[in-house]
Amino acid sequence: MPCRVLPELKNGLHHLVRLLEFDDGTTWIAHVRMHADTQDSALMLQSEVDIMTLIRQRTGIPVPTVYAYEVDTRNPTSAAFILMQVVSGNTAMDSDGGYQVHQGQIPLHRRPAFCLAAAKIQVQMASVRLPLIGMVIQDSTGDYTVGPFPDIGGPFRRATDFIEAWARHSRFPLSVDAVNRIPSAALRSRILTSIQAFPNQLASSAADLTTHNDGPFPITHTDFFHSNIVVDSEYTIQGVIDWEGACTMPWELVEPPFSLETVPPELDAPYNYDENGVPVDQDTRQRWDERRQYEKLIAEMELEMQGDNMLSSTLSNRRHQKLAYAMRVYTNPGKLLFYDRVV
């Protein structure tokens, strides 16, 4: 059936997104890779397709249906792409007036229902587990296996193996000039030292930082932010999108939705807290409360689904959450923190 490309256009860091409209009014999304394909980019795209298929097969999480795809440029379009279902609605970040109205935050009156729905999604996602840590691939028999990460190798049988490999390959993305802009010389020196020492400290302490060293390991959406959750006009979740990079991860590195993110106090500047260790910023205090409530919701969902308590115990473990946050922001975007306080 013929189709036409609609004028709506969105650009991401690596992809171009266009809408295709067929003669019967049906629309699909074309998710087109903009850069030249490599073996690693082909692996990432194949894994994105396969992990969406796995999630759709084993959970009730609303994930777009994939209609067709090509992992490299060896096709008539000369581009790697995915053609998939259009999820009706808008991302939670862009709804209710978007950034101009609420600066990218979920409106307060929407948060309780949204967090409940997100908790149901995360419990289901964490229930899908595989024996190794790495990228998920569907083999020729239809079974799911775990392959290497493009950047650090693998797959890994133990959480400590993953952490040690991450430490060997991790690079802090900001230059020394960015650190030198910190006004206080003492603070500047302390942060620079912690940034430089963090990978080696992490590698040498990996065994002490892990509680669940052996699998199975949970599926993790590595950008579980409300910009990747589509909602309708009532803020009801319609779909979870952008599964590129989703993988199995150590339990110790599983985090709640990034809309609940705060800097762990140990890694932060002391002046951001009062004498009782409470954040001086009202929004941060609010987020602390919302995060505690989210952890309770996760525990309730685990009981309702008659599963184990692996996810709730992970999210309530402050040491694990500190580790997960530090490893994530060390490489992207490269936050200036006291990383030596992780170990």
Image: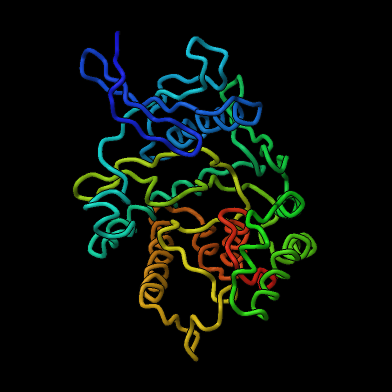
Residue located at (64% from left, 54% from top): 173
Image point (22%, 52%), residue name = 97
Rendered view: 29 above or below 208: above
Extreme-bottom residue of the structure: 275
Residue found at x 47% / y 32%: 15
Above or below for 89 versus 327? above
Q: Position of residue 329 (x, y in %)?
A: 58, 58
Above or below 271: residue 209: above
Which image quarter: residue 188? bottom right
- Where's the N terminus, which quadrant? top left
Q: Which residue is more in the foreground, 180 or 37?
A: 180
Relative side of 155 to 272, left or right: right
Tell me where residue 163 appears, x and y as whole percent.
71, 54
Residue 56's quadrant in the figure? top left
Number of numbered markers: 0
Work out which quarter of the rendered image holds the C terminus and state it: bottom right
Query: Which colour scheme appears in the figure?
Result: rainbow
In terms of depth relative to the viewer, which is nearer, 148 or 339? 339
- In this rendering, the answer to whether 207 lies above or below 134 is below
Residue 193: x and y in percent read 73, 70
Q: Could you tell whether 165 is left or right of 281 in the image?
A: right
